[in-house]
Image: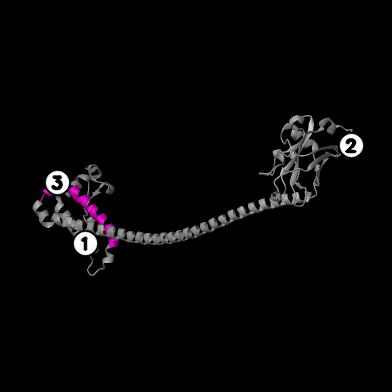
Amino acid sequence: MHTEGPSKEKNHSTPLNSKDGCRFSEIGCSFRGSKEKTKEHEKSAVGTHLMMLLQHIKQLRASLFPVGGAANGIIPHLATAECKVKGLERKVSDLQLQGALEVSGDLEVDCFPGSSVYEEESILQQLVREKVISELENKLHVFENIVAVLNKEVETSNLEIAAFRRKSGLDQDVIQSLELKITELHRCLTQKDAGLSKLHKRLQSFEQASYDGVFLWKITDVNRKYHDSVTGRVVSLFSPAFYTAKYGYKVCLRIYLNGDGTGKGTHVSLFFVVMKGEYDALLPWPFKHKVTFMMLDQNNREHVIDAFRPDLTSASFQRPVSDMNVASGCPMFLPLCKLQSPKYAYVREDTLFLKCIIETNS
């Protein structure tokens, strides 16, 4: 007997941490026991639990809607209230699954009508929706302000771009005007350059011109010019123009260093050319004055001389209708071997001299 007592106490005693609390402990139920006892308690105390739940909801509602409370005080409790309602909904759902609502149906319906729970839930959901809508409206207002600012900036940028385009258009007009002026200046400069070149040639011609019918022609770079004549690069050379008198005939000489016609490749050919002059209308035609050619020996020993009188029927001596008449003269004026011979000094320091004399008295 002495030993059985302690064993019974050991077998029937249960540690505190092995007991389970009722799931409605959060709303005031203080029952604790084993799992089986707890399940029996939850089935038998449905009405009590629902009354506790109703009381808890009323307290929650009172905390959300205090008498005389400002509307601004509701919003901070919304999140907490919503969480509690969801917890209550889970508990009621568990009770429905266990069939607890089948017991004392009339009592539960009378004490805790379902419409009241749904009404509370609807009110809370509506408050949540209103809070979300309010926050979205605030964000929308902020976005509208941002868009308004951006629209102003875009409008300002558009005005600046328009002003820049107008200025750019004006600059383009100025650039085009300057380009036209530059083109006109280039054209004027080209014309002036051409005029200066023409005046330079005319001045040079006047400096070298003779007005007494006697002309001395100095030819330099003879070897190069002879080579050009042989290769056909420049077959002939024209002398500057000269005159038989101040208001007389305008004429020039033409030389082929490698020959022309019957003297090609063997002789120097020298020709006389009647040119179109400023006073041709006052002069007698055809040209009939005797012409004398001279290749000067620079040692003054043996000059080469040839002369001819114009053929009055030849077109070469009629009044010119173009800048020059056809050249006429001596195709076999000087043999090339004599020109190149060191025995003579017709070419010295790569230079030779030709002289033409027109007898204006004949």
Going by the numbered disc 2, the residue's amino acid type is Glu
Q: Is residue 351 in view?
A: no
Q: Residues within 10 Å of mark 1 (few under 14, many from 20)?
A: some
Q: Which residues are magenta?
A: 75-104
| N-terminal label among 3 and 1 | 1
Identify the secondary structure beneath mark 1: helix
Going by the numbered disc 1, the residue's amino acid type is Arg
Label of residue 99 in the image = 3
Q: Residue furthest bottom?
A: 68
Q: Can you identify the residue that label 2 sits on? A: 302
Question: Could you say which quadrant of the image residue 216 lies in?
Answer: top right
The number of numbered badges drawn on the structure is: 3
| N-terminal label among 2 and 3 | 3
Going by the numbered disc 3, the residue's amino acid type is Gly
Identify the secondary structure beneath mark 2: loop
Question: Which secondary structure is most common in the magenta stretch?
Answer: helix
Residue 72 pos. (x, y %): 28, 66
Question: Could you tell me which quadrant the N terminus lies in?
Answer: top left
Label of residue 188 in the image = none
Residue closer to the observer: 290 or 193:
290
Q: Can you identify the residue that label 1 sits on? A: 61
